[in-house]
Amino acid sequence: MSRIVMKFGGTSVADVDRIRNVAAHVAREVKAGNEVAVVVSAMAGETNRLVALCREAAPLHDAREYDAVVSSGENVTSGLLAIVLQTMGIEARSWQGWQIPMRTNEAHGAARIADIDGSQIIERFGRGQVAVIAGFQGLSPLNRISTLGRGGSDTTAVALAAALKADRCDIYTDVDGVYTTDPRIVKSARRLPQISHEEMLEMASLGAKVLHVRSVELAMLYEVPLMVCSSFADPAVTPPGTLITGENIDMEAETVTSIAYSRDEAQVTLRDVPDAPGVAHRVFGPLADANINVDMIVQNISDDGSTTDITFTVPQSEFDRAMATLEEQRETIRFAKLLGDTDVVKVSVIGVGMRSHAGVAATAFKALGERSINIRAITTSEIKISVLIDSAYTELAVRTLHSVYGLDKVAH
Ligand code: ADP
Ligand code: ASP
Ligand code: MG
């Protein structure tokens, strides 16, 4: 007998038929004698719809009320799955975040889990009950509903697995594992049988949607065995997938192991800023004070020794606030023009093996240049290279890089 947490994403619970299919996967594990907790997302598209309603009500709104609204999608699917399981003769009940409780900090919209009381769920495992948990939501210190950030149900699942001391956490989604890049845009992407925490963390934080970044961090910290597999596989058998593991896989053997992209980027450019000591602080200080994350930064060498241009990126969701914050500082920073562009994408080449290889970046720049793809900004670390390009070239750039580093599946 094992204790397992199974998580099903939005496409997997998109309608009642799909929820019946999810129930069949749950039934397989219950019949095998396991103790099962299931975490569900909202139906595909539902959270987007709820976010849009909040924006329609007021473009700038109370984050606590946003959470009250957007958390509701998961209430529906958790209740529906419990109903379907009951009709199959499986004892089940739904749990909302506050009922467990799953306590978080007060960062509404991007809350972090602080503590989970798993005692009631464990007690009911003893009576053969399946727990169906609404993902993505928790309870803030002031007893308000909080949410964990978009894609956060993965994090609910891994945190719950750690709290329940589960033997494993299985993330069921609409692809059958983690691939060398998004299999929806590169048909020749290869499924990885396993991947290290370090590499998965990098992929997730650079935009590979398949796992929420925080879920990978928690799996690493609490040593939760994590699997990604497909809910569309035959529910009668345990599906194959990708294991995210702390084991030292010989990733260094390959220089580049994956390509990721993120559309959640916006570019900001300040034209003709005085080229003098302290200017970076005058630009980035107010952004930091406003809690706006700045990612890539490029400062041009000044032509005339007196002014320069500064370009950087922020998440799309913070673009309007970033532009407003800088506009307020126009007098202090003394820039001539403030320009913004949201039609940009960040494409990243990832591989821990890069640490010991030279010339990896040059290969990317050459390949993109040959396709006439202009690079607007670059950042690198020991294990990744990221470039900012026009979003119109996303697919071409991802495909080009995937193939130039030899990641394409070999045709049989
Ligand atoms: P869920 O709703 O189940 O949480 P998501 O849409 O959040 O699913 O994540 C799954 C999606 O992640 C896939 O449909 C795929 O398009 C995308 N994806 C991006 N990069 C990768 C990758 N490297 N491997 C697998 N899937 C990826
Ligand atoms: N429903 C939430 C979202 O769409 C959480 C999740 O699916 O993981 O972001
Ligand atoms: Mg997801």
Image (cartoon, rainbow, N blue to C red):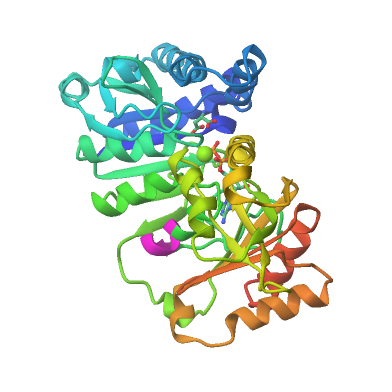
- Name the spot of residue 117 as percent of width and height, x first: 19, 26
Q: How many marks are shown on the rendered structure?
A: 0
Residue 396 image-quadrant placement: bottom right
**Residue 33 position by quadrant:** top left
Q: Nearer the viewer, residue 383 or 128?
A: 383
- Residue at image location 70% in from the left, 73% down from the top: 403
Q: Residue at x 23, y 49 (%)?
A: 222
Give the residue drawn at x 47%, y 21%.
Answer: 63
Magenta residue span: 195-201
Q: In the displayed structure, would residue 348 be above or below residue 225?
A: below
Q: Residue furthest bottom?
A: 358
Q: Is residue 147 magenta?
A: no
Instruction: Please determine whether, in this image, residue 215 is positioned above or below residue 242.
Output: above
User: Quadrant where the C terminus lies?
Assistant: bottom right
Would residue 154 be found to the left or right of residue 307 on screen?
Answer: left
Horizontal and vertical percent position of residue 44: 61, 28
The quarter in which the N terminus is drawn is top left
Q: Is residue 293 above or below residue 200?
A: above
| Whole-percent x, y for residue 238 in the image | 43, 44
Q: Residue at left 39%, top 33%? A: 28
Comparing 265 with 298, the one in front is 298
Q: Is residue 410 left or right of residue 380?
A: right
Q: Main secondary structure of the magenta part?
A: helix
